[in-house]
Image: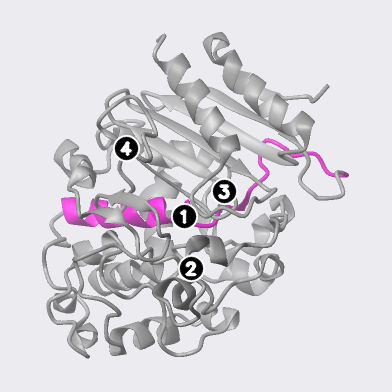
Amino acid sequence: MVDIQGTLDDRFSSVRDVLATNLESGADVGASVAVFVDGDPVVDIWGGFADVERTRPWERDTITNVWSTTKTMTALCALVLADRGEIDFYAPVARYWPEFKANGKESIEVRHLMSHTAGLSGWEELMTTADLYDWDKATSLLAAQAPWWEPGTASGYHAITQGYLVGEVVRRVTGQSLGTFFRTELAEPLGADFHIGLPASADGRVSNVIPPPPADFAALGAVDPNSIAMRTLLNPLPTVEAVWTEGWRRAEIPAANGHGNARSVALVQSVLACGGHLNGRRFLSEAGCRAVFDEQSNGPDLVLTLPIRFGMGYGLPSEGMPIGPNAQTCYWGGYGGSVIVVDLDRRATIAYMMNRMESGIVGDARGFSIIAAAHEAIGTL
């Protein structure tokens, strides 16, 4: 019998049962789940092991690389700055980052970066994983290249590049790196154990992600090596082994290398769920939160080859991705299975973070089962 640690409201026992089932079946090795309502945890549980050998228990303060769930933290930073009037989502990127206008990009607006519609889903020049640790190289190459499709006409998931694009706008506006801005403006005031650029002092608490089954890129419809999907996903394709390294952890890769657990993710995103006011502090206005629902694209994504509806920095519910019963809900997840759902109607967040990766980019049955159980329980409150 798997030992599930932590606390939860009895009405959420089904959420604990789903996590226990996943751990008992081997679908999960180690994982954490958190549900916050009105900024307070009604579920904060974890279980399993922090290592593939199953020798080290997953503890309360265990953290792991959550891949693209990091994008929701980057988006929230941009939303805060937009709410302060320091960024205009409908302004040209070049207003803040003059070099960006090269190669016909004068008309690309910040909203295009936020919604994966800028046409810069990958790098034209060959990149290595180590190049991702070089902020100046990653951003200057994107500033110099031409878009791969007409900006604003379709989304094409900016799997790695979005963090550099939005992050550089944040840096130009604030003079701080994205990771520093996130830490000082959100993580530290909230007491949230989430990091974009992991300090060495936290290394001992990291659970290394466990490699997924080999990805079937042909299943993405990306058999052509020159397709947008393949050029995006394979240049570079960070290996899981690279994620275990000090170089990856110390770098700021704001689309992919955030480290945290379900509690920290749910806590930070409760800023959005609670209309911008949390723990006695206002981080942004209610109108600033609702900017998330400014739809920017709705249709087949050129990289994921799935129909995706994007708002300002987050995925929005659609027929193919219902994600919850309420209209004012947004979400995103990470390579391998992590996921965060933010329900502004119920002032709730649902987070699932784990170490054993599946091959999917947009979530899998483990997280979706937890989301379904949590939504059902939230409906009883």
Horizontal side of 329 relative to 70 (left or right) equals: left
Horizontal side of 23 relative to 239 (left or right) equals: right
> Height in image: 245 above or below 356?
below
User: Tag 4, which secondary structure?
Assistant: loop
Task: Provide the residue designation for mark 4.
Answer: 319
Task: Provide the residue designation for mark 1.
Answer: 70
**Around disc 3, counting alpha carbons within 10 Å, would you say few (fewer than 14), some (14 to 19), or many (20 or more)?**
many
> Height in image: 63 above or below 200?
above
Q: Which residues are magenta?
A: 55-83
Q: Mark 2 or mark 3: name the one nearer the start of the chain.
A: 2
Mark 1 vs mark 3, foreground winner is 1
Amino acid type at image mark 4: Glu
Q: Mark 1 or mark 2: name the one nearer the start of the chain.
A: 1
Name the image quarter holding the C terminus: top left
> Residue 93 at x, y = what percent?
19, 74
Task: Provide the residue designation for mark 3.
Answer: 260
Mark 3 vs mark 4, foreground winner is 4
